[in-house]
Image (spheres, coloured by chain):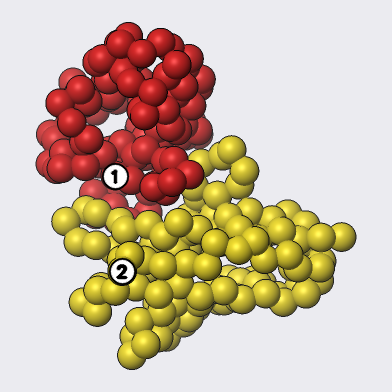
Chain colours: A yellow, B red
């Protein structure tokens, strides 16, 4: 089993819709979690951290479920510019981030 | 402000040749990470430095790979000799050690070994 698993997609979503995807992690001792975004042929960029209480940044909401060992990302009122690959990342300790393979999101007009 | 700078942006070489990738981290950042990304394996950490000192190189594929950080503003990743399976995008990222999880990536070097 991979340490961090994501549905590769692609998720094809009409503009303005709400989309959500999950990521599961295997190490129950993991303490911190992140979503990074990677545009096609670009570098990953931090989108948001995921806190135990959940957190929201504009149209984006991240949630953590420790009991089931998954984190989620919800995007409301999706924009064409949201099209990207979303990488789920878990703190693996010792300065190591464990990266999921990413979920590809395509927003269609 | 300048972000992480990597050079070259693209490199095409023949099998057996030496390849040197370069990285300039964000000024003031004291942690530096080298990653490799492929379709098959995703993003893999190769090595990271704290205060110019290599801390963990367990991700380096084999002896053909080496990395150095002679000072706080420069790092290199060298592959000698290169092989076709080394073809990938190589990213350099930097961070403050205190918030190392927030990593700032360079634009990457796309390496193709023929």
Q: Quadrant of residue B18?
A: top left
Q: Is residue A4 visible?
A: yes
Q: Secondary structure at mark 2?
A: loop
The chain letter for the residue carrying disc 1 is B
* Residue matched to label 2: A1
Please tell me how crowded label 1 is: few (under 14), some (14-19), or many (20+) other residues with Cα within 10 Å: many
Residue at 24% across, 79% down: A28
Name the residue that disc number 1 marks: B45
Seen in the picture, residue A82 relative to B85 is either above or below; the reply is below
Circle 2 Cα neighbour tier, 10 Å, few/some/many (<14 / 14–19 / ≥20): few
Q: Which mark is residue A16?
A: none
Residue B92 percent location from the top left of the image: 37, 35
Q: Nearer the viewer, residue A108 or B97?
A: A108
Q: Which part of the image, by quadrant, shows the C terminus of chain B?
A: top left
In this rendering, would B95 be left or right of A109?
left
Q: Nearer the viewer, residue A109 or A58?
A: A109
For the question of whether residue B4 can be seen, the reply is: no
In the rendering, at what x and y percent does residue B52 appear?
17, 32
Q: Is residue B62 above or below residue B21?
A: below
Residue B63 % position (x, y)? 15, 26
The percent position of residue A49, horizontal first and vertical second, equals 43, 67
């Amino acid at each position: 089993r991979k340490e961090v698993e994501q549905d590769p997609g692609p998720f094809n979503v009409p503009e303005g819709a709400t989309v959500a995807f999950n990521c599961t992690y295997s190490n129950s001792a993991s303490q911190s979690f992140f979503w990074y975004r990677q545009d096609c042929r670009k570098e990953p960029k931090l989108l948001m951290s995921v806190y135990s209480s959940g957190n929201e940044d504009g149209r984006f909401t991240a949630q953590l479920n420790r009991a089931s060992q998954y984190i989620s990302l919800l995007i409301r009122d999706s924009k064409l510019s949201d099209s990207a690959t979303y990488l789920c990342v878990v703190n693996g300790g010792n300065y190591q981030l464990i990266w999921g393979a990413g979920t590809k999101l395509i927003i269609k007009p | 402000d300048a972000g992480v700078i990597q050079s070259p942006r693209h490199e095409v070489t023949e099998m057996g040749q030496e390849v040197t990738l370069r990285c300039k981290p964000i000024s003031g950042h004291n942690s530096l990470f080298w990653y490799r990304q492929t379709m098959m394996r995703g993003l893999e950490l190769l090595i990271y430095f704290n205060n110019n000192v290599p801390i963990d190189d367990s991700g380096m594929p084999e002896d053909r790979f080496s990395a150095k950080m002679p000072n706080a503003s420069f790092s290199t990743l060298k592959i000698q000799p290169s092989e076709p399976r080394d073809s990938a995008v190589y990213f350099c990222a930097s961070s403050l050690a205190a918030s190392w999880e927030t990593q700032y990536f360079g634009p990457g070097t796309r390496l193709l070994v023929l």
